[in-house]
Image: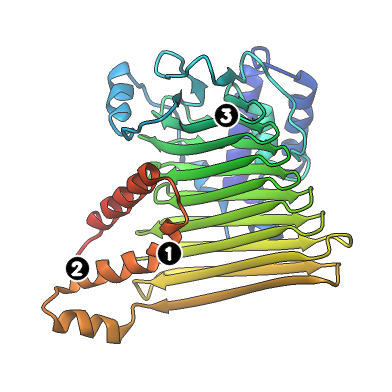
Amino acid sequence: MSGALATAAGGLLARYDRLRSVLPGDAEARSRAAATIRRRGLPSPRDEAWRYTNLKALAEIGGPRRATSADVAELLQGLPVLDAAATVVLVDGRLRRDLSRVPDTLAVASFAEHPLTAEGLRPERETLVAANEMLAEDGALIDVSAGRDAGLVLLASIGTGAEDSFHPRHSVRLAEGAKLTLFELSIGSGRYLHNPVFSVELAKDAVLTHVRLQDEPSTAVYLSTTYVAVDAAATYDSFTLNLGARLGRTEVHATLRGERAVTHLNAAQLLSGTQHGDVTTVVSHIAPSCASRQTVKNVLSAHARAVFQGKIEVARGAQKTDGYQMNQTLLLSPDAEVDSKPQLEIYADDVKCSHGVTIGALDADQMFYLRSRGIGADEARSILVRAFLAAALDAVGDEQVRGVLEAAIEGWWARQPA
């Protein structure tokens, strides 16, 4: 482990030593997680799963800064105005009921008050999950009862830089036939590590639409891990838009464990400067007649770097699996870089699985056509980029949420140098 990674791991362990007496939940599980980090350290590019992503930026976060209520109020102005059934706000990883709006009809609890041990998490294998297991202080626990449509819920995480790292533990559980649209938004100011872990459990016929907008400050590091268990005829439909953070990684482990389960893991990354964005997915088909779709699009300018690692695992008994993954990248600069690693691991013989990768620059003929119609170079580039992303955004069914994503993309484009 490099000196930078050892420094970062030491900082996390020092935080644990300071807080261990007041952290909620299973002290023994936290101790085991700390032992894992002491033994293994943080992952490095020598680890295959982190081959293309280096966490040395964690050592450069530095100490916390003083944040005031005015800082929080200013960041709250960045939240979208939505006709949502509920708004759940976390500040520096802690649930703020005074800033949230949750009706009595929706069950939202605090991890700090009800620390749970979620099934399926693997802190002994994923070191960032071990860090969360060791340091989680709070998070949102959302439960939807059988047959109920909970509508749209905004889960907003705000980082102020008052903490050098925060590690919220979230849980979303939908009972049989339940429905929920969860819009997760991450924004902030300052230098910090945001390391959330989600546990998602969908019972038979449940439908969860999970949309993420990650627009953290350019000085932050965002490392998210989600575990999803999908029962028979249930659907996990997700879309992630990564715009922010100096270093960002969105990792999803989905297990289709009931017949006719469905999961969609779609994403788009718009990166500039020296940003590094990583989308890593593992979809495990262990039941027959299940379907999974993954489409990840990257738009890269300047010296940005994008990573896609997508794996489809098909167990021996998972006959009639239908799995698909595609990674498409648009390079706006000769200095941008993309690493793409789609994988198939199949042990069943009656399956339909495929993957593909495309990488290219803006089409010169299309640029010429638009310029010949009197459209300026910047606007022509913008039109082609929006067209490239259009199909990805069309997968977001909620018009309010799609409008927020479109506005965020327009804002990103407006910040790019001419």
- Residue 413 image-quadrant placement: bottom left
Among the two numbered marks 1 and 3 on one chain, the one whose residue lies closer to the N terminus: 3
- Give left or right: position of 392 versus 370: right
Residue ID at (26%, 71%): 381
| Residue annotated with mark 1 | 391
Give the x, y percent position of residue 380: 22, 72
Nearer-the-camera pick, 112 or 273: 112
The quadrant in which the C terminus is found is bottom left
Nearer-the-camera pick, 225 or 31: 225
Numbered marks: total? 3
Residue ID at (43%, 78%): 360
Among the two numbered marks 2 and 1 on one chain, the one whose residue lies closer to the N terminus: 2
The answer to whether residue 44 is seen in the rendering is no
| Residue annotated with mark 2 | 379
The kind of residue on which mark 3 rests is: Pro
Up-down: is 137 above or below 214?
above
The kind of residue on which mark 2 rests is: Glu
- Residue 409 image-quadrant placement: bottom left
How far apart marks 1 and 3 lie (CA) works out to 32 Å
Nearer-the-camera pick, 359 or 22: 359
User: Nearer the observer, disc 1 or disc 3?
Assistant: 1
- Secondary element under disc 2, as helix, strand or loop, is helix
| Residue annotated with mark 3 | 168
- Secondary element under disc 3, as helix, strand or loop, is loop
The kind of residue on which mark 1 rests is: Ala
Of the numbered discs in the image, which one, if any, rests on residue 300? none
Give the x, y percent position of residue 41: 70, 43
